[in-house]
Image (cartoon, rainbow, N blue to C red):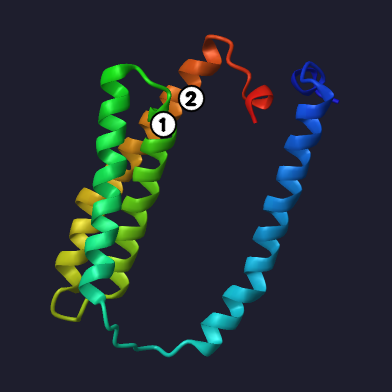
Amino acid sequence: MSASLASVPTRARLRSRRRATVLAGAAVVLLPWTVHISVMLPAQHSAQHWNAAWVGLNIVMIIAIATTAWGSWRGHPIVIQASLVAAVLLCVDAWFDTVTASAGTFAATLAMAALIELPAAIFFAVVSWRAFSGLRAVGVNFREIG
């Protein structure tokens, strides 16, 4: 048993291991599902609420970025989660922008992903990591929290 894990109370260790087992199981279940949808989904699809999907994604990105800003101004640990969510959403946005781009807009879309969205995602991931590292540096034990 590692030294850091040994210092964690037994109940928290069990909860952490159960959570890890459930999450690993979810990842394993997603593998065959991903293969299934790669074979079953059509290459093209017309969506009824295409604009709502994109507007919704952008609204959630705005909330994540604004929450990161608020947490940064307040010195609140929510910065860790909010900036990580912003990073992931920016990657999702870049991915779907690129794979749904028409032939005429593909180059511009790819450039926007490479020059704006992905660098912004990296920025937010670094913000999250630094905030997390800062809390660990002052002795916050995340195993006891979860």
Q: Secondary structure at mark 1?
A: helix
Q: Position of residue 62 (x, y in %)?
A: 24, 46
Q: Residues within 10 Å of mark 1 (few under 14, many from 20)?
A: many
**Residue type pointed to by label 1:** Ser
Q: Nearer the viewer, residue 124 or 23?
A: 23
**Residue type pointed to by label 2:** Phe
Instruction: Name the residue: 35% across, 54% down.
Output: 91
Q: Residues within 10 Å of mark 2 (few under 14, many from 20)?
A: some
Instruction: Name the residue: 24% across, 55% down.
Output: 58
Q: Quadrant of the C terminus?
A: top right
Instruction: Name the residue furthest top.
Output: 138
Q: Position of residue 35 (x, y in %)?
A: 60, 78
* Number of the label disc, if any, that sits on residue 132: 2
Q: Is residue 55 above or below residue 124?
A: below
Q: Secondary structure at mark 2?
A: helix
Q: Nearer the viewer, residue 11 or 134?
A: 11
Instruction: Name the residue: 28% across, 75% down.
Output: 100
- In space, the residues marked 2 and 1 are separated at their CA atoms by 6 Å
Proximity of marks 2 and 1: CB atoms separated by less than 8 Å: yes
Q: Is residue 16 above or below residue 101?
A: above
Q: Quadrant of the N terminus?
A: top right
In the picture of the structure, the residue carrying the numbered disc 1 is: 128
Quarter occupied by residue 86: top left
